[in-house]
Amino acid sequence: MKTPPTKSAPTNPTAPASHNPPAPKNAPPESPVMYETENDLKLDGRVELNRLMNERLASIVDLQMQMKQAHWNVKGPNFIGLHKLFDEIAEALEDYVDTIAERIVQLGGIAEGTVRSAAARSRLPEYPLAIADGATHVEAVARALSTFGAEARTTIDEANALGDADSADVFTEVSRGIDKWLWFVEAHTQAAK
Ligand SMILES: [Fe+2]
């Protein structure tokens, strides 16, 4: 009979094997703490994937709330269409947030998805708070989506380079979705007046 793993406490792969204290609360990102897992991906790769995916998680949590910011504050003749579109994007992003966070945990990492973690690590510029008209929101939303889209696309290659086709697939799905939403948003500006 296979003996189940007895250790469930997080371990720090950078510490000596005999010396793995329990994870400190609010561990800084430069000290990744990993749970033991039977997952066959190598620990070094999982540590790096944990770091990369937590960076993406921060940005996409930020992006989700930026879409809500646009949803709440857009005004003008295209109000209702944009109001609904920005909310649809936020809902889609919520699913991506969950998928990325759970992928982190599946690899033995800790999903660091609090608003404060997102604020500290997001690579997105802050969404402009004082804008109102639809065209300005369309421009700001398109920029936010494309900024995160570039991050997601880069992560496909990074995950593949670390031998993790499944995380690459997650980011392929996310990247494809972001491209679709970018199209929905930019279509408001691409027709001749
Ligand atoms: Fe709403």
Image (spheres, grey):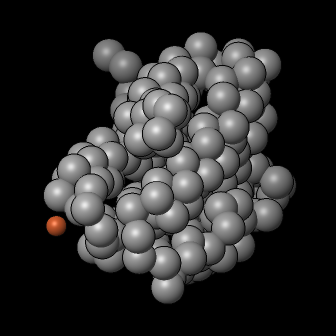
The single residue placed furthest to the front in the displayed view is 193
Residue located 61% across and 42% down the image: 146
Residue located 32% across and 16% down the image: 1
Q: Position of residue 77 (x, y in %)?
A: 26, 62
Residue located 41% across and 76% down the image: 132
Q: Hey, which quadrant is residue 127 in on the image?
A: bottom right
**Quarter of the image where ligand 1 sits:** bottom left
Residue located 30% across and 72% down the image: 75
Position above or below: 66 against 179: below
Tell me if I can see residue 17 in this picture: yes
Q: Position of residue 53 (x, y in %)?
A: 61, 44
Q: Hey, which quadrant is residue 26 in on the image?
A: bottom right
Q: Nearer the viewer, residue 157 or 23?
A: 157
Position above or below: 121 against 94: below
Q: Position of residue 117 (x, y in %)?
A: 56, 73
Tell me if I can see residue 102 in this picture: no
Position above or below: 150 against 180: below
Q: Nearer the viewer, residue 183 or 135?
A: 135
Q: Nearer the viewer, residue 147 or 138?
A: 138
Q: Nearer the viewer, residue 35 or 172?
A: 172
The single residue placed furthest to the bottom in the displayed view is 130
- Asked whether, in this view, residue 83 is left or right of residue 99, the answer is left
Count of marks, rendered view: 0
- Asked whether, in this view, residue 1 is left or right of residue 84, the answer is right
Q: Position of residue 110 (x, y in %)?
A: 51, 55
